[in-house]
Image: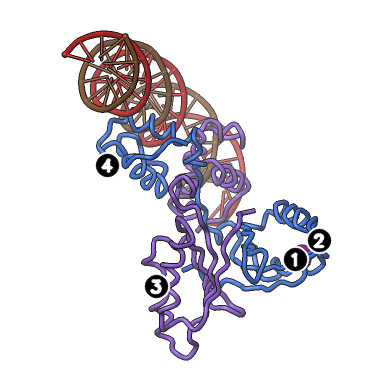
Chain colours: A purple, B blue, C brown, D red
DNA sequence: TCGGGCACGCAAAAACGTTGCGTCAGCGGG
DNA sequence: CCCGCTGACGCAACGTTTTTGCGTGCCCGA
């Protein structure tokens, strides 16, 4: 992972907002030729600084109107519960993000569903009937600020 | 917002993982010509189903090695605090996401900083010395599962 | 002072995105 | 029953963008 210079950082800032910009436009904005921009982006992709280029979808449009944050504590004295829990989390497509955290909780899980009932079903399977889970708390999301 | 058919959904699934795929390749995968794919994507962009196409960066590579989840309660009896708080949150570039939630807390804020001290500075300004904030809790992120 | 490595710009070539046109299927009204 | 309308499609021509090879200049270490 080589060091990033100022031009790299400006390019990253630009493509992190809009990855569909032509190289010529990026070049104009940072003062570089299209081919120089291209070589930098290729290098940044290869070195893993740019992980992916993805389309951001409107959750509502694809029938995922509800977002919920769940805070989870595992039963503390069994380490193999950790692997079991993360495995289940990873296998669940409704899970958008899962943070392993310090503090009062062990995990914070962001879950996207069509409606509250969809969340209830997932929470039942993932938390309520899960022997690895000691306690959990549901924080339905009103809005993303 | 028109209805999505099966081809739309398959295209969305593909571009939500990799938005840099050529139209020809997408067409091959769903059984459509490049121009038909293009027209569908244009429509999906115009109708807001596709919000943006962005590059996903490695936080570590851009000097944002630490992620923290903060749970926040505002002082409950003053509604103008809500606007003040969301305004401050929006103005803070280190805030990756902010959920307005129901349940035991009012907000869940995901914050990205270089290190713990960076978080401390932001938390001090945003939460500790903020009259709108009644109490808050810090959950440093070990890892993203 | 002299090479070697590296990033650059330029230009040609290949790939890709875009658009106009003709076709066809589905549908509602005459 | 048939006609015309609408909407989506494929094809092909066109314009733009990406890609690649090459020559130049700069910086650094010998």
**Which portion, as a residue range, is magenta?**
B122-127
Front: mark 2 or 1? 2
Q: For the residues marked 4 and 1, what is the alpha-carbon distance in whole angstroms?
A: 50 Å
Does mark 2 fall on the same chain as mark 4?
Answer: yes
Q: Rounded to the nearest whole Å, what is the CA distance between mark 3 and mark 2?
A: 39 Å
Using the image, determine if residue A47 lies above or below residue A105. above
Name the residue: 70% across, 66% down. Answer: B118
Chain of the residue where label 2 is placed in the rendered structure: B
Q: Residue at x 60, y 48 (%)?
A: A9
Residue picked out by circle 3:
A125
Callout 2 touching callout 1 (CB < 8 Å): yes
Percent coordinates x, y for residue B85 in the rendering:
75, 57
Residue D24, how many percent across, how many down? 52, 30
| Label drawn at residue B78 | 2
Which residue lies under the disc numbered 4? Answer: B29
Same chain check for tags 4 and 1: yes
Structural distance between the alpha carbons of marks 3 and 4: 34 Å
Judging depth in this view, the residue of D27 and B16 nearest the camera is: B16
- Residues at marks 2 and 1 on the same chain: yes
Q: Tell me the chain of label 4.
A: B
Determine crowd level at label 1: few under 14, some 14-19, many 20+ residues with C-alpha closer than 10 A: many
Mark 2, residues whose alpha carbon is within 10 Å: few (<14), some, or many (≥20)? few
Label 4: element kind:
helix
The mark found on residue B74 in the picture is 1
Both labels 3 and 4 in a single chain: no
Residue nearer the viewer, B23 or B45: B45
Q: Does the magenta run of residues contain A53?
A: no
């Amino acid at each position: 992972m080589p060091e990033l210079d100022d031009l790299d950082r400006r390019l990253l800032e630009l493509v992190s907002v809009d990855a569909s910009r032509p190289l010529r436009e990026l070049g104009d904005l940072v003062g570089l030729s299209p081919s120089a921009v291209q070589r930098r982006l290729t290098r940044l992709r290869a070195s893993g600084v740019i992980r992916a280029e993805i389309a951001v979808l409107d959750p509502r449009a694809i029938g995922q109107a509800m977002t919920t944050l769940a805070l989870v504590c595992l039963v503390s004295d069994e380490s193999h519960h950790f692997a079991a829990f993360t495995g289940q989390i990873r296998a669940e497509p409704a899970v958008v993000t899962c943070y392993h955290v310090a503090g009062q909780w062990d995990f914070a899980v962001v879950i996207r569903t069509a409606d509250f009932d969809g969340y209830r079903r997932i929470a039942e399977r993932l938390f309520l009937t899960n022997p690895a889970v000691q306690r959990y708390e549901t924080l339905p999301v009103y809005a993303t600020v």
